[in-house]
Amino acid sequence: MTQISALQKARAAYEPKLPPALHRGANIVTAEGAATTSVADSERIAKLFKGTFGSPVVTFEKGAEAASGKALTVGVILSGGQAPGGHNVIGGLFDGLKSINADSKLYGFLRGPDGLLKNEYLELTSDIIDAYRNTGGFDMIGSGRTKLETIEDFELSKKDCQALGINSLVVIGGDDSNTNACLLAEYYKSNDIPINVVGCPKTIDGDLKNEQIEASFGFDTACRVYSELIGNIERDANSAKKYWHFIKLMGRSASHIALECALQTQANIAIISEEVAERKMTIGEIVEDITQIVVKRAANDDNFGVALIPEGLIEFIPEMKNLISELNDMLAAEAAIFGQINDPDEKLQFVNSHLGKDSSFTFSSLPHSIQLQLCLDRDPHGNVQVSLIETEKMLAEMVAFRLKELKAEGKFDGKFSTQSHFLGYEGRCAAPSNYDADYCYSLGYTASALLGNGTTGYMSSVRNTTKSASEWTCGGIPITMMLNMERRHGEDKPVIQKALVKLNGAPFLKFVTRREKWSIATEYVYPGPIQYFGPGEVCDQVTKTLELERN
């Protein structure tokens, strides 16, 4: 990085806040209560994790200055998709290790878990760390999606760690990555391998959280970036007054981003996938709901609006979920014949003729472009690539068709022109907000304290973050507490349970009380860009979601 922007230079000087317990070495540990259990399937989880299951929740307390501990040699891995603040986790980890013992070393494995398996690494020094403080992205060491699941993987990782003298590993990732960290910790402990493993909660999707993990890092920053862009689009819509903007937002497994952005911007429409699933809504019902809002706004001469759509909506609509499942099975069984058909329309006819009655009806109701995406855009396993389906365009087309019907019936005399957007990668590598800069630094520092105290199989936890940093608490939560059994590729496997939007939770209930008013009135909020410098009430905000959940 030979050239840096003025903002990056100013941000490099920012000193993230720390909880009081970390100021003096975090050498006092409180084990809270009796042995813990898992969120579900406890008997099966206990049998799979005999070495780490039942560990107590750990909290660090403020105490006298810690004496220097033994030097640690630690490896760190960035796993999965990028999220703002990852570099600050590594910075906090580095500083924490040096506070334990100045001779501690930190190695970064390159390109994620693959670097651990291939013994590709970089020793992280203060010069390297300082160049990346308070920056977005994962470019310090790169990331990857290789999974650590097999005994061969575990043995290879042990060999590579031992070659470098590594006695601890930190895995920075989401639910799957931290599940792998838990499996790795269990293998090492059960086989008396002296390598401890700690995880840190990362994902902009916001679906890695529970009572002990208040937020996954990156969610705050990503939602602020998306909300700024949505606010800009709202301002444009309210200025031109001639377009309906359909905006798809990241969040395949949960709708936390869509809900948070709706609360921040007060868009006219925000679909929450979990509600769609709970109400067993059909795609026709979703289209009708949107259509009626368009009609009501047009009656007020407001032929414009903004609709927010979560990326994973398709998989939450029961009829679409059934269609996708049937398509996956049918195309796998008929792959040879399907592959010989060259004409796209003939492919669609072939598919439709092999579907059941209900799925055929659903398939036929979809726009031509979506039919093609469902059939042609397949992953290496032959499954539909749901994230590539242009749901925002699909809904816009279907609403337009429904409005034509209403116009022919004399029930709609407004105008309906659309623009579609997908806000995804724009939010993954932004410079972290003050919240994420502080939170991530504390997560990394806490991880060093967990390793310094000899714990393994834990996830770093920093809590009470809606308050000032002087009131934050930190410690570790056993990863086994978050596990349940899920069906993956035909097998039952232990995985961290995803946190979906709770329909009885405060954020969604707040949204429900306001959405009808927002749908008809134009009450847009324009959040503007992330503010890094200035008064705390502007720069140190927390997400609406976290504020409502905790207060």
Image (cartoon, grey):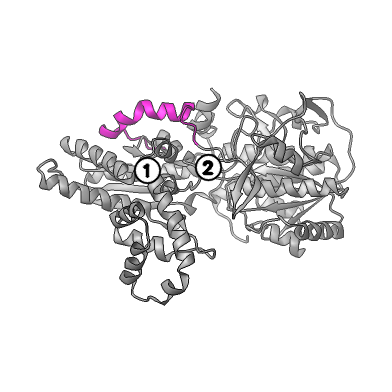
Mark 1 is surrounded, within 10 Å at the Cα level, by few (under 14), some (14 to 19) or many (20 or more) other residues, namely: many
290 lies above or below 78: above
- Badge 2 amino acid: Thr
Marked residue nearer the N-terminal end (1 or 2): 2
Q: Position of residue 519 (x, y in %)?
A: 29, 34
Is 171 positioned to the left or the right of 437 in the image?
Answer: right
> How far is mark 1 from mark 2, CA to CA?
18 Å
Is 120 positioned to the left or the right of 485 in the image?
Answer: right
Q: Position of residue 102 (x, y in %)?
A: 85, 45
Tag in front: 1 or 2: 1
- Residue drawn 43% across the image and 27% down it: 509
- Residue drawn 61% across the image and 29% down it: 465
375 lies above or below 461: below
Which residue is label 2 attached to? 221
Mark 2 is surrounded, within 10 Å at the Cα level, by few (under 14), some (14 to 19) or many (20 or more) other residues, namely: many
* Secondary structure state at the residue bearing disc 1: strand
One can see residue 135 in this view: no
